[in-house]
Image (spheres, rainbow, N blue to C red):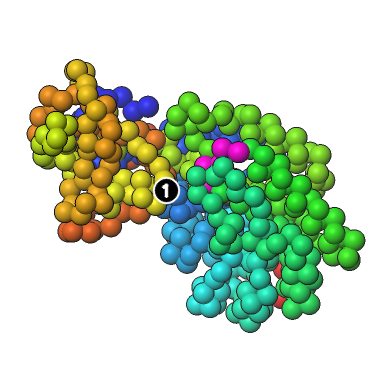
Amino acid sequence: MIPLSRLQGLAKERGTPLFVVDHDELRRSYAEFKKRLPRVQAYYAVKANPDPAIVKTLYEAGASFDVASMPEFMIVHENIQHLPPKERQDWIWDKIIYANPIKAVEALTQLDYYKPLVTYDNLEEIRKIQKYAPHAGLALRLKVPNTGAMVELSSKFGAAPGDAVDLILAAEEAGLAVEGLSFHVGSQTSNFENYVQALNLAAGVFKEAKERGYSKMNLLDIGGGFPVPYDESVKPFHVLAGRINAELDRLFAKDVQILAEPGRFLVATAATSVVKIIGKAVREGKTCYYVNDGVYHTYSGIIFDHCKYHLKPFRKGPTQICSVFGPTCDALDVISMAEDLPTDLELGELLYSEQIGAYSHASSTTFNGFPPAKVAHVNQRPPERAPSRRRREAELVG
């Protein structure tokens, strides 16, 4: 945790609202992921927070990247400009997966030069990839259980396991190389059985594909969903990692490359929001505070991510249940209707929220004319070149 005195100093120096990113915490989270899942290469889900400084730090730590749009692709690409052009093209092979199963034609056309790994889940996408990005490698995304996830994804993406091999063979017939499978159990998954079921479904598809004559798959992307300890109800990550490791060793040969797409897990605990009280009122006996950040900005995760962020004061005092509202004129701009805060806080005093790094500042708008929070980075280190890891041994079919 960033010391409160440092948060106050940054707020005084740079103003509020302020979004403070701790790069030591980013490195700690990445190291924890690699320690607990040593067989898995982490592809940071850039959508969780696309700040280029975050991308750089994770790249230097050894991370690869999961992107879902060309702007996200370019955020990653622009942070490897120190590599020669040819090496930069090769670098894409083991550093980026374009994990959006539905891609615009314009995106595919731009991607083809890089021969990337992309996901798909239907016949129409095969036709698009064949026409506009024939040099891409493919990973078929499976529909898997999302029970217990804070944000479920299987209603929008994923091929039914029963249709999977037909889609793999259809891609091969189109002259494309299906390198493996992917799935996503849903964001902030509290039900660890989702991973167990998904891994068993994937193993079944590997087996059926081989039985039907397709034995070229050597890659499995186990997606994201790795939970952050927002509160005591979240089981420790090492418990989940133990379950995943056991299933990977039981179901998949050592030569099958395992990828994952952690976003929230890597960045959530690395950021703190600092806001200023700009208004105060008593409504029906309850103290209400108005602050200069809200759900259209750093606290957007309340709406889009189904997340709750508690606000804390920088000083102690008798507390009561209070309401906290954002600065806009929209009634939707409610941070909390039940926050335990001192009732004697004055205009200009500061509050802070921890564990707010994921799906928060990334969704900021300028609604009602209010700009996003300023960003402050702490504990950064000079960039170093990350080691290259070739994801493939041969040129893709194309």
Asked whether, in this view, residue 319 is left or right of residue 256, the answer is left
Which residue appears at 61% of the width and 52% of the height?
A: 184
**Vertical order, 341 against 380 (above or below):** above
- Write the start and end of the magenta stretch as one range: 187-191
Q: Main secondary structure of the magenta part?
A: strand
Q: Quadrant of residue 38?
A: top right
Which residue was labeled with disc 1? 305
Asked whether, in this view, residue 326 is left or right of residue 257, the answer is left
Task: Report the amino acid beneath label 1.
Answer: Asp
Q: Is residue 381 visible?
A: no
Which residue in the rendered view is the most extreme toward the front?
Answer: 284
Which residue appears at 71% of the width and 57% of the height?
A: 181
Which residue appears at 23% of the width and 58% of the height?
A: 366
Estimate the x, y position of residue 94 in percent, counting from the top left.
63, 55
Estimate the x, y position of residue 167 in percent, counting from the top left.
74, 69
| Residue 107 counted in the magenta span | no
- Disc 1 is placed on an element classified as loop
Which residue appears at 75% of the width and 51% of the height?
A: 201
Which residue in the rendered view is the most extreme toward the bottom?
Answer: 131
Q: Quadrant of the N terminus?
A: top left
Asked whether, in this view, residue 59 is left or right of residue 200, the answer is left
Estimate the x, y position of residue 166 in percent, counting from the top left.
78, 69
Q: Is residue 245 visible?
A: yes
Estimate the x, y position of residue 96 in percent, counting from the top left.
57, 57
Q: Quadrant of residue 193?
A: top right
> Which of the two residues, 117 or 293, is positioned nearer the viewer here?
293
Q: Quadrant of the C terminus?
A: bottom right
